[in-house]
Amino acid sequence: MLDGVLIDDANAFNDKLREWEDYYNYHRPHGGLGGQTPYERLKQKTTTQA
């Protein structure tokens, strides 16, 4: 996501890190989770089905 850009500002780095975490956990399908995102898997595992 940084494409080789060097960031020496802590606030800018933290903003980019949050952006990456959001992408990784909520948007990127994971092969080990059957194509689900970590959030989708967590939601599936914690939602009680009546």
Image (spheres, grey):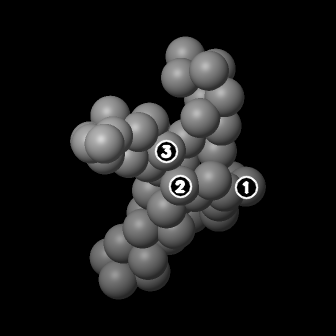
The secondary structure type at the circle numbered 1 is loop
Q: 40 or 10: which is nearer to us?
A: 40
Q: 32 or 42: which is nearer to us?
A: 42
**In the rendered image, which residue does mark 1 sit on?**
3
Packing grade of label 2 (10 A; few <14, some 14-19, many >=20) is some
Estimate the spatial distance between the alpha carbons at disc 1 and disc 3, rounded to whole Å: 28 Å
Packing grade of label 3 (10 A; few <14, some 14-19, many >=20) is some
**In the rendered image, which residue does mark 3 sit on?**
40
Packing grade of label 1 (10 A; few <14, some 14-19, many >=20) is few
Against 45, is 39 above or below? below
- Mark 1 or mark 3, whichever is nearer to me: 3
Amino acid residing under circle 3: Glu
Against 31, is 24 above or below? below
32 vs 46, left or right, is right
Q: Which residue is drawn at 44% across and 77% down?
A: 15
Q: 16 or 5: which is nearer to us?
A: 16
Amino acid residing under circle 2: Tyr
22 vs 42, left or right, is right
Rendered image: mark on residue 26: 2
Q: In which quarter of the image is residue 1?
A: bottom right
Against 45, is 22 above or below? below
Q: Earlier in the sequence, mark 3 or mark 2?
A: 2
